[in-house]
Amino acid sequence: MPNCISSETLRSRLRYFLWQRPATRDQISMVLEALRDVGPSAIFGGLLRDLCLLGSRNFQSDVDIVVDSQSQDDIERRIFKWKPVRNKFGGYRFSVGGQKFDVWMLNNTWAFQRGYVVEADFSTLPLTTFFNWDAVAYRIDDRSIICSDDYFSELSKKVIDVNLRENPNPIGYVVRTLRMAAIHQPLFSPRLIHHMNAMFEIFHPLQIIKAEHKAYARPMLSVPYLDEISQKIVKLTSDEIHFPARLTPHQLGLPL
């Protein structure tokens, strides 16, 4: 990972990824063009995070696109040819040339719907994510990057934190946290460490492993991994932690 990540780092990598990279430019441009007249749209979350942390060559995320439109039917008509599957949150999942996309209406974002974040707008969209690393959006129309003032600083320092605790899939975010610990070896904020301690009291390791197998084609978690990481969390929470800490254990389910 680069020593310093900035908005210019992301802007440069986005320019290449969206308009120059042969493996992705055609698929993404087709989807963005299809949605262009439906309403303003923004790329959100994982794509932007991974471009910052991994670069375009190692990008593996889905592409999340949020559309500021009041017409679900218009969106569905525009992407119909890709046979989208509608999810329980009102969004659509589909593939174009092997690249997976998730598209949804801005005001259908879960945290807006539940009232955890008020005033559904692109400017408040980054407030809706569980992780601080995902709290970034890129508007297609004016090519603006929307994030907090310390977003790139925290990403550069590899400090991962809870952005919004409330979420629709608690065990799913436990799995994501554990996988991110293995893949990125980040520093965990005290708030995230305390949150994970509470989650380990709710979910048994076998439940977590089962959830990972259901969600990921290449699982990497194992009971030794979970035992070691949970012991580290218990030790940290028994002390008064005031600074980010690294949790990555030695036992992984598979080589990275």
Image: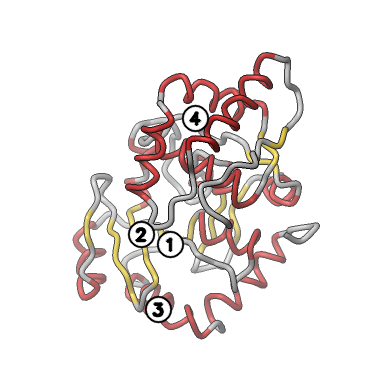
Q: Earlier in the sequence, mark 2 or mark 4?
A: 2
Rendered view: 50 above or below 226: below
Q: CA distance from mark 2 to mark 4?
A: 22 Å
Q: Determine which residue is flagged by label 2.
A: 102
Q: Say what secondary structure mark 2 lies in.
A: strand
How packed mark 2 is, by other alpha carbons closer than 10 Å (few <14, some 14-19, many 20 or more), is some
- Give me the disc on residue 165: 4
Q: Position of residue 86 (x, y in %)?
A: 22, 55
Nearer to the camera, 184 or 220: 220
Q: Position of residue 74 (x, y in %)?
A: 22, 65
Q: Determine which residue is flagged by label 1.
A: 62
Q: Say what secondary structure mark 3 lies in.
A: helix
Q: Position of residue 72 (x, y in %)?
A: 23, 57
Q: Quadrant of the N terminus?
A: bottom right
Extreme right residue here? 3
How packed mark 4 is, by other alpha carbons closer than 10 Å (few <14, some 14-19, many 20 or more), is some
Q: CA distance from mark 2 to mark 1?
A: 7 Å
Q: CA distance from mark 1 to mark 3?
A: 12 Å
Q: Is residue 208 left or right of residue 252?
A: left
Rendered view: 211 above or below 53: above
Q: Say what secondary structure mark 4 lies in.
A: loop
Residue occupying image coordinates x 61% and y 49%: 147
Nearer to the camera, 116 or 51: 51
* Tag in front: 1 or 4: 1
Residue type at tag 1 = Asp
Q: CA distance from mark 2 to mark 3?
A: 13 Å
- What's the image's color scheme? secondary structure
Residue type at tag 2 = Asp
